[in-house]
Image (cartoon, helix red, strand yellow):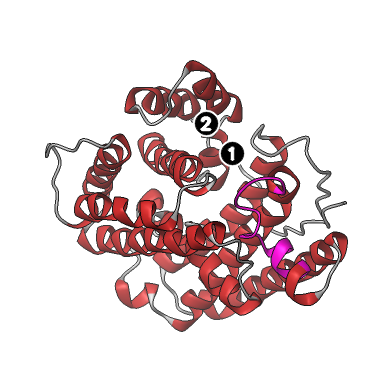
Amino acid sequence: MRIPALTCPFPSEVNPYVEEVDRDTLAWLAASGMIEGAENLERYGRARYGWLGGRTYPYAARELCRLVTDWCVWLFAFDDAFCESDRAAGEIARALPQFISVIDDLDEGDAVGNVFARSLLEIKSRIAAAGNADQLDRWRAMTKDYLFAQVWEAANREHDIVPSFDDYIVMRRRTGAMLTVFALVDVAAGVYLTPGEWRHPHVRAITEHANDVVVWDNDLISYAKERSGPNINNNLVSVLRRHKGCSTQEAMDLIGGMRNEAVAGMVALRPALDALGSPAVDAYVKGLERWISGSVDYSLTSSRYVGVCPVPVD
């Protein structure tokens, strides 16, 4: 079993504050209470999630890089606790109201009991301070989409369902949480992507391509590690094996071609996006490109993924 080459024509950069961010994010995670036990916290430390933020937001100022990295780590912690486990769909659904209340209703300083919800409120407050109301609302909408999608994913686990190809493509764009991190690209860059620019057809198209590339890469890279786990049906390799009659290697090769087509689609859209003449759109597109290169670079060096399956890069 060999992962196909992950083509990446975009520059690879590292934030100059990466080591500080890595240290501070781990301290924030430890103080949050989301991770139980010294062994689990040590595992998060070995993964060096600060390098994910440093590689995917290389342009961000130190505190903004901390913000987006803390958000990525919240997503990893939530994923490990709720999504890579045997939690039933009903259990996750019953947990949603407290998270929706945090996202939509509660303010900084309000009492929150659940450690994940409390940390989510802190993140929201920091986003509100760093951005404007439109940027906060965009993040809110994308985060609620992500949370609701976890119920669908949990139902697949609970009933041993391998989703159809079309259903999986639609829902993976939501379960992967990429829209929640893309929603913060302009915040991290210190610019303002207007609602009209966010909804522009070309911006939506390149966002969709970038989303597909990152989540399909993740499915490829994580398959070997997760194939004996409870969430393996929610992986594009498994979907293709079941519904297209592919072997594991054939499925991986097919996904490799799909993600390379999506990368090519991003490159093809660049001239039309440049023609919009918007500094915010330009910063956003560069941010998406850094997410492609940064996520590949991180996945090849992080203990969360490395050492399980060889991953060539072009």
> SS class of the residue under badge 2?
helix
In the drawing, what numbered circle is on residue 18? Answer: 2
Q: Would you identify the image quadrant in which residue 197 lies?
A: bottom left
The residue positioned 46% from the left and 29% from the top of the image is 21
State yes or no: residue 239 in magenta. Answer: yes
Viewer-side residue, 4 vs 283: 4
Residue 246 locus on image (x, y percent)? 84, 70
Q: What residue type is labelled 2?
A: Val
Label 1 neighbour load within 10 Å: few <14, some 14-19, many 20+? some
Are circles 2 and 1 on residues that touch, CB within 8 Å? yes
Viewer-side residue, 9 vs 94: 94
The residue positioned 12% from the left and 36% from the top of the image is 109
Residue that lies at the very extreme toward the top in this rendered image = 38
Count the labels in the image: 2
Q: Would you identify the image quadrant in which residue 278 lies?
A: bottom left
Label 2 neighbour load within 10 Å: few <14, some 14-19, many 20+? many
Q: Give the range drawn in magenta.
A: 227-241
Return the residue at label 1: 14
Is 248 placed left or right of 58 in the picture? right
Report, in whole angstroms, how far the alpha carbon at label 2 lies from the one at label 1. Answer: 7 Å
The residue positioned 64% from the left and 67% from the top of the image is 162
